[in-house]
Amino acid sequence: MASSQLKTGSRADATAAGGFRAVAPVLALCWLSVFFDGMDVNIYGAVMPYMLKDHGLGLTTGVAGTIGSWTTFGMLIGALVAGSVTDWLGRRPLLTVSVLLFSTGSAVCALANGVTMFGAGRFLAGLGLGGLMPLCLAMVMEFAPKGKVALATGVLMTSYHSGGMAATGLGLSIAPSHGWRWVFAAGAAPALVAVPLLLRFLPESPAALLAGGRRAAADAVADRYGLARPVAPEERATGARGRWESILALFGPGFRWATPLLWAASFCGLLLVYGVSTWLPQLMRASGYGLTDSVTFLLVVNAGGIVGMLFAGRIADRFGPARISGLFFAFTAVGVLLLNSHLPLAATYVMVGVTGVWLFSAQTMVYAAANAIYSSDKRATGLGWVTGVGRFGAVVGPSLAGSLVAGGRQDLGFTAFAVAGVLGAVLVTLAQFAARIGARRPVVAAAV
């Protein structure tokens, strides 16, 4: 307990020198990386209506849902691996490899001669996409000034939705005239744009440098960016045993119940995020809306996501990320139910945008809640596993919605998303409560 308090105190004192300027270079590079992440994830949903018309590819609605789940299964593996080895291999090398992986996966999809090759490309892309998100979150949270972590997280995640809007724009402008393959070809651009910038300008995490035994380098980076010098955690084993112990520590005193509750909340959030990102155009088209409007809804929901990230980040720093996450999950449940009410077209556009405000912010504030709950020596591993286990929801969401659409029951897709919203609200609220109870117990034991 004393050790974690010391680390928290040291981090709290790092309001030094740079303020928000300290995180700006890291935030800018991670923003660019997550922009391409969001573009890659949303490309599939944006071009799916056009792919279903390409009979040479052999894609059906049922297979489309399965491939969406392959992508998110790759994300699950990527997130768990990255979160478990980042302190040993470093954040910057893993982040660079992640970008290369999902760029290569998009190139494979563009060249696919059938659904098997296309699915393999999406799985490969998923490995990179899954590893990238927890790494960028951990980097931005580490470099963010005190009291601005949720805001910095929200700003970072606006990039995901900007990428989603870019994917929709590419789908609307390129796919009708040039075909869906050229949209995936554009997804290979990150390897040419982001990777050189990451290698040249992204600093390594001081915590990762210290974990690798590079004390002088860790202190130098911390001093350069106005951060507190990292404090070495208690001695732990190295190699596979050390990685296993870092995972078990997430169930140690103070985190025993909060960890599984955060995992379950992330499951619900990512079921919503990836279910909606993959299937919103097709769900709305099956509900009677035109093709152009159905694809444009994906752009509108991501625009709402950008507004929500900035709004949620500000109020979460004031009222607490878990509280805001729970509230936004509840609002999301109401919003997706209203999308199934066959409102007039103008009202539907408004409702889609408003739902985007709540939906994506709810999940992002789960990450901010994890940052607030875990001590600094557990944060990277904790975030990796919150995002990684949550990917099971990302696997279930596209597959579930795809099977419902294939069976002509798209109305139940909206209902399933609403249930996920209600459960997410309950779970993230309980996680905060469990963390507070767990934090008090060691103090009581010491007094006795």
Image (cartoon, rainbow, N blue to C red):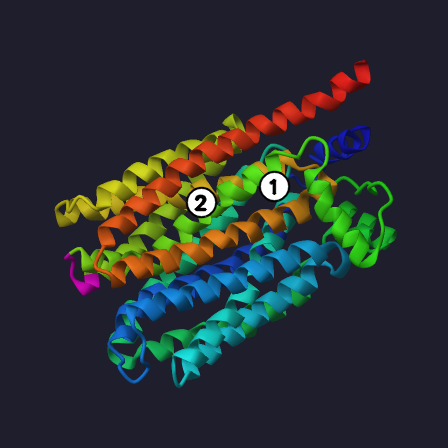
Q: Quadrant of residue 201?
A: bottom right
Residue at which label 1 appears:
20
Using residue 88 as the reference point, say whether residue 113 is left or right of it. Answer: left
Q: Which contiguous range is marked in magenta?
A: 288-292
In the image, 354: left or right of 285?
right
Q: Where in the figure is residue 404, as x and y percent of width and height?
A: 28, 57
Circle 1 packing at 10 Å, graded few (<14), some (14-19), many (20+), is: some
What type of secondary structure mainly makes up the magenta span?
Answer: loop
Q: Which residue is mark 2?
A: 268
Point 38% across, 63% down: residue: 166
Instruction: Name the mark nearer the viewer: 2 or 1.
Output: 2
Residue sitting farthest toward the front: 407
Q: Position of residue 320 (x, y in %)?
A: 53, 29
Identify the residue at image location x=76%, y=53%.
243
* Residue 188 visible here: no
Q: Would you say residue 292 is visible in this rendering?
A: yes
Please, is residue 332 above or below residue 176 in the view?
above
Q: How many marks?
A: 2
Q: Quadrant of the N terminus?
A: top right
User: Of 31 and 376, which appears nearest the observer?
Assistant: 376
For image coordinates 71% across by 22% down, the residue present is: 441
Circles 2, 1 touching at the beta carbon (< 8 Å): no
Please state which of residues 412 and 97 is positioned toward the viewer in this rendering.
Answer: 412
Name the disc covering residue 35, or none. none
Where does the image place residue 266, in percent across and percent down from the top left? 50, 45
Q: Is residue 58 magenta?
A: no
Q: Secondary structure at mark 2?
A: helix
Give the distance between the C-alpha atoms of the residues marked 2 and 1, in whole angstroms: 32 Å
Helix, strand or loop at mark 1: helix
| Mark 2 vs 1, N-terminal side | 1
